[in-house]
Amino acid sequence: MSSTTLLLLVAFSNTILVALSHSPYSQSSTPSEWRSARATYYAAADPRDAVGGACGYGDLEKAGYGKATAGMSTVLFEKGQICGACFEVKCVDDLRWCIPGTSIIVTATNFCAPNYGFPADGGGKCNPPNAHFVLPIEIFEKIAIWKASNMPIQYRRINCRKEGGIRFSIDGAGVFLSVLIHNVAGAGDISAVKIKGSRTGWLPMNRNWGQNWHINADLKNQPISFEVTSSDGLTVTSYNVAPKDWNFGQTFEGKQFQS
């Protein structure tokens, strides 16, 4: 075999190795995204979601989230940044209580507050550093028997799928605007928002709490546009979402992220 042929074979082999190492189906890109946590449930009569929990979504049924929701412990909640994100959750490591082969998809809508009167490995299930999900019992029972109570689970972030566009619910008074941003597909959680009237430039909004964003600006009698950036860095701009005669207490629908 000539030296030229040998060099060509080596180069060809290296090309194949590089291609395989970057393949999206390589072993290193599969189960590593699953993480460990625990989950408990609350009863259907529990009023914790009466106002949409700590994310402020209001009536979760009307907001499009239904009962497939979760309260997140401190290390997962990220001071409200996680609101709207979607997770796939499955029960693991307990053959007695887990329903095998099942998983659920839930949206982060609430905060499970820590209880520092108990240790993290005792009654303080949502204390740092615990990763913990609190689920409605109807959702919990899809992956585990209810008698299991505090269950080991695995979870991973997934893209959210939504019907229709991003919704903007405008509240406030005078020059104070509070906008709840919900029904967000893709990453689901929002990291930045800008607002624009027909007589202004783009104005950055501040997170008030959850996915409620606010600004002091006189935007009455102007059509309003929104620029929404999700946690994965993607941006969707919806022009003239609210018409010139918009009013407080109204909800408008804009464009949507791809899911």
Image (cartoon, rainbow, N blue to C red):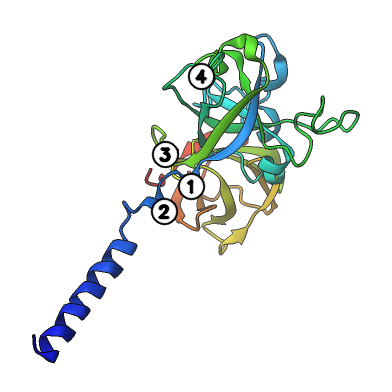
Q: At numbered mark 2, what does the secondary structure look like: helix, strand or loop?
A: helix
Residue contact at pointers 1 and 2, CB within 8 angstroms: yes
Q: Quadrant of residue 50?
A: top right
Farthest residue, direction front: 1
Q: CA distance from mark 3 to mark 1?
A: 32 Å
Task: Please give the label number shown on residue 258.
Answer: none
Q: CA distance from mark 1 to mark 2?
A: 7 Å
The reply to whether residue 105 is visible in this rendering is yes
Residue 65, given in percent of the width and then of the height, sits at 52, 26
Q: Which residue is mark 1?
A: 32
- Please, what is the three-letter code of the amino acid marked with disc 3? Gly
Front residue (pair 160, 198)? 160
Residue 83, given in percent of the width and then of the height, sits at 61, 39
Residue 242, given in percent of the width and then of the height, sits at 49, 43
Q: Earlier in the sequence, mark 3 or mark 1?
A: 1
Q: Which residue is mark 3?
A: 165
In this rendering, which labeled residue sits more in front, label 2 or label 4?
2
Q: Earlier in the sequence, mark 4 or mark 3?
A: 4
Task: Please give the label number shown on residue 28.
Answer: 2
Residue 225, given in percent of the width and then of the height, sits at 50, 52
- Please, what is the three-letter code of the amino acid marked with disc 4? Ile
